[in-house]
Amino acid sequence: MVALHLIQTLTAAAYITAGISLGFGFVRARPQLRRAGVVIAAIAAIAHAAVLWLTLSVAEGWDVNFLNTFSLAAWLVAVLLLISTLRHGLLEAGIVVFPGTAIAVILAELIPVNPLVLSEPSIELELHVFSSLLAYCLLSLAALTALMLAVQDKLLRQPQRIRQLEMLPPLNVLETLMFRQVAAGLFVLTVSLITGFLFVENLLAQHLVHKTVLTLLSWLLFSMLLFGRWRYGLRGRQAIYFTLTAMSVLLLGYFGSKLVLEILLDRSWSASGPTAAATAALFSLDRS
């Protein structure tokens, strides 16, 4: 246990150091600081993977309580961001992502939460869980790209910040990437919703309605964004605000009620069956 706490502390410190290094590298236009930030973040992600294995894996199955789930999602976003930097240069998003992931690690370390064990999940449930998590991560990257577009739009109006602009990908490349991320995330979110409706037992009795409505609202907003892009050439600030609004609704749908029940109210889940209970505990269709 002492070793686990030490690894968690070092992991969080490495993530924070990576974010600070990227921040100074961007503000002062120093590529060497950016490269150091990537290396440190990669080390932190490896250590974080070990932490997740030690905390999620229990004798009965997988402990998917709110903080473990939040930590896992944050780790996946960080890993996807590191991978995407190899081709698309989204490095500056790490200024937000890596400290945020550090917070997830620290919360999981410091706040005691009742275990929520998922044991012997069916293939259908695994598909639902995986698609839910992947959709959240892809759409999170789209929201981060939207934030970078907002920063770039502001820098374009300040000619004296040209050095910072040179460190970011071209505006049209970022915008195209954001829409591709939204399209991919929306497709996977659709799979998540379909599998949830097919395999969740007794939706009303499990109090899944609020969570489902928020997820469907987010799905609708992202769909409208893509339709607006295809039909009317939607872009710029409107596309940025649309993306961030839809992601905010999805974030509330994925984690909002789970946070209130497990952390603030200290209530455990109850359901009408093992598949229902496990599904209700996770991601886009967990119970409120």
Image (tube, grey):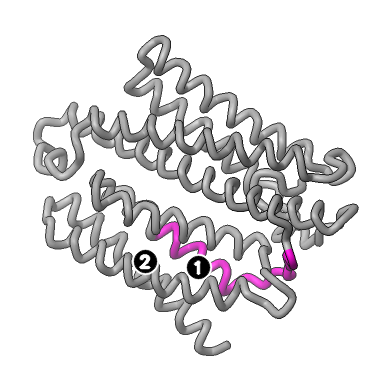
| Relative height, residue 39 to residue 249 (above, below) | below
- Toward the viewer: 188 or 97? 188
Residue at the image point whose x is 39% and y is 28% from the top = 240
**How far is disc 1 from disc 2 in space, using C-alphas?**
10 Å
The amino acid marked with disc number 1 is Val
| Relative height, residue 229 to residue 268 (above, below) | above
What's the magenta region?
99-120
Residue extending farthest front: 123
Q: Name the spot of residue 62 as percent of width and height, x first.
A: 67, 69
- Toward the viewer: 188 or 77? 188
Left or right for 25, reference 284: left
SS under mark 2: helix
| Relative height, residue 74 to residue 186 (above, below) | below
Question: Quadrant location of residue 239?
Answer: top left
| Relative height, residue 57 to residue 104 (above, below) | below
Residue extending farthest bottom: 2
Left or right for 143, reference 108: left
The amino acid marked with disc number 2 is Tyr
N-terminal of the pair, mark 1 or mark 2, is 2
**Which label belongs to residue 15?**
2
Q: Residues within 10 Å of mark 2 (few under 14, many from 20)?
A: many
Residue at the image point whose x is 25% and y is 44% from the top = 88
Which residue has dot 1 on it? 105
SS under mark 1: helix
- Toward the viewer: 219 or 6? 219
The reply to whether the magenta stretch includes residue 201 is no
Q: Name the spot of residue 253 as percent of width and height, x first.
A: 64, 41
Q: Name the spot of residue 146 as percent of width and height, x first.
A: 37, 35
